Amino acid sequence: MSAEKNVHVAAFAFPFGSHPTPLLHLVQRLAAAASPAVRFSYFNTAGSNRKLFPAANLLPGHDNIKAYDVEDGVPEGHVFSGNPLEPIGLFIGATPQNFKKRLEEVVEETGSKATCLLTDAFLWFAAEMAEEIGIPWVAFWTAGPTPISLHLNTDVILAKLGQNDDKQNQDQTLDFIPGMSAVHVADLPQEILHLDTPFSRLLYSMSLALPRAAAVVLNSFDGIVDAAVENDLKSKLRKILNVGPSPHPPLNEEERGGGDCLSWLSNHPAAAVAYISFGTMLTPPPPELSALAEVLEEKKIPYLWSFRDNSKRHLLEGFFERTSSVGKVVEWAPQVEVLAHSSVGVFVTHCGWNSVVESITGGMPMICRPFFGDQMINRRLVEDVWRIGVGVEGGSFSASGLAKAFDVVMFGEKGKEIRGNIGKLRECANIAIEENGTSTQNFKSLVGLVTSYDQD
Ligand code: UDP
């Protein structure tokens, strides 16, 4: 048994998109469950830390969590080209030295050696770092079980389909991988098929490193995917811990969005409002924004739209003004609460994993418009496997395709079926987080794993 005062969990964040937030939520959850003597250090870039830690790198109510800044790899005076992969490439170039150096400084400053590395799974170099220090590496995978299984099968996929091969049949299913007969080549993250960018190489390195992790943790729950996928993961990883759906810590004013969304929603009848959000990184291209606006206006659907992209806002200014009596636009919505609100009838989403899980726990049907990464796989599962939502005709928004999707989900018989299916999946999620549920038990194992090792 460890002397808890010697336990120091070092968490490393991948500082892009929604990644840092669920890792911090996991750290908060662990810190609340562990002894107050356990120290949690959260390493992330300064820009990302400023958003997550309002007060001097501390979180109110969490005395045992402290944030530390690592270098982001951006040269002084650097002018960005606008390519979203550029800051990611620069950051990757700065790893692992930036984390290594800062961790050494923190150990020196605090006199407390790291006893566990808990990192975003993308930060694959933690396998070696943890082995060098002689401590466990716990990897947090922020997406679902299906994409991680596909990444772990990258070599099998490339052997079968060929790398960079544009002649791949997009409709071919991946039935040569356990549990993947519903997944099509078109659903695969591009990075699996094209190993020619720093980011795709990072993901490939991750797929090779993850079997060395003491555990891989997911915001997911047992039984959500085919048993063959779960068994394949179990055969490739030392331990897989589904600990979700993860509870969300109370929101601060900024996270709440300041737009008083919930009381606005309460003024609407049941299941009448469309909630629209494309996550933390995306805005659909202009013609698709116009198509969505056109259909909402034409069908007089009340909407709550989380819209932050100032470079595209002018495209919708007229629509927002004309529909201001039935629609609400905010820069940030308290999404978890919105998706659980009885006035919301559909979630128009890009199918990011957190959004999908939150939609399931809220019992909310989805209209899916995936763009990249794991989003196409999530859309496939939502529409064809779990049948808890629909895609749009042709894969991108057109007025006619969207009108059909809204008709199906909000006004048609199939909508009732979809709601029934999502109710069943939600029930599985709720059972997993009961006191004896699998996610609760897995979380307890995780607390044991990250706090059981000390250096003395
Ligand atoms: N989110 C939110 N309010 C918003 C937009 C997004 O709270 O207005 C949160 C949402 O609840 C989810 C996360 O941002 O937890 C987005 O994560 P996801 O994995 O769905 O997409 P990503 O941003 O990674 O593409």
Image: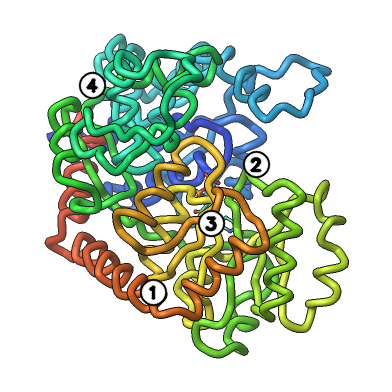
Circle 3 packing at 10 Å, graded few (<14), some (14-19), many (20+), is some
As drawn, is 240 to the left or to the right of 408?
left
Element at badge 4?
A: helix
Quadrant placement of the N terminus? top left
- Which is closer to the viewer, label 2 or label 4? 4
Upstream in sequence: badge 1 or badge 3: 3
Element at badge 1?
A: helix
Element at badge 3?
A: loop
Spatial CA span between label 2 and label 4? 33 Å
Element at badge 2?
A: helix
Residue 349 is drawn in which quadrant? bottom right
Residue 423 position in % (x across, y down): 30, 72
- Using the image as rendered, state which of residue 352 and residue 136 is in the foreground: 352
Circle 2 packing at 10 Å, graded few (<14), some (14-19), many (20+), is some
Upstream in sequence: badge 4 or badge 3: 4
Upstream in sequence: badge 1 or badge 2: 2
Residue holding disc 4: 211
Q: Is the CB–ligand 1 distance for label 1 below 8 Å?
A: no
Residue 415 position in % (x across, y down): 41, 75
Spatial CA span between label 1 and label 3? 15 Å
Give, as a three-letter code, the residue at label 1: Lys
Residue holding disc 2: 50
Give, as a three-letter code, the residue at label 2: Arg
Circle 1 packing at 10 Å, graded few (<14), some (14-19), many (20+), is some
Q: Is residue 162 above or below residue 348?
A: above
- Which is closer to the viewer, label 4 or label 3? 3
Spatial CA span between label 3 and label 2? 37 Å
Residue 424 position in % (x across, y down): 25, 69
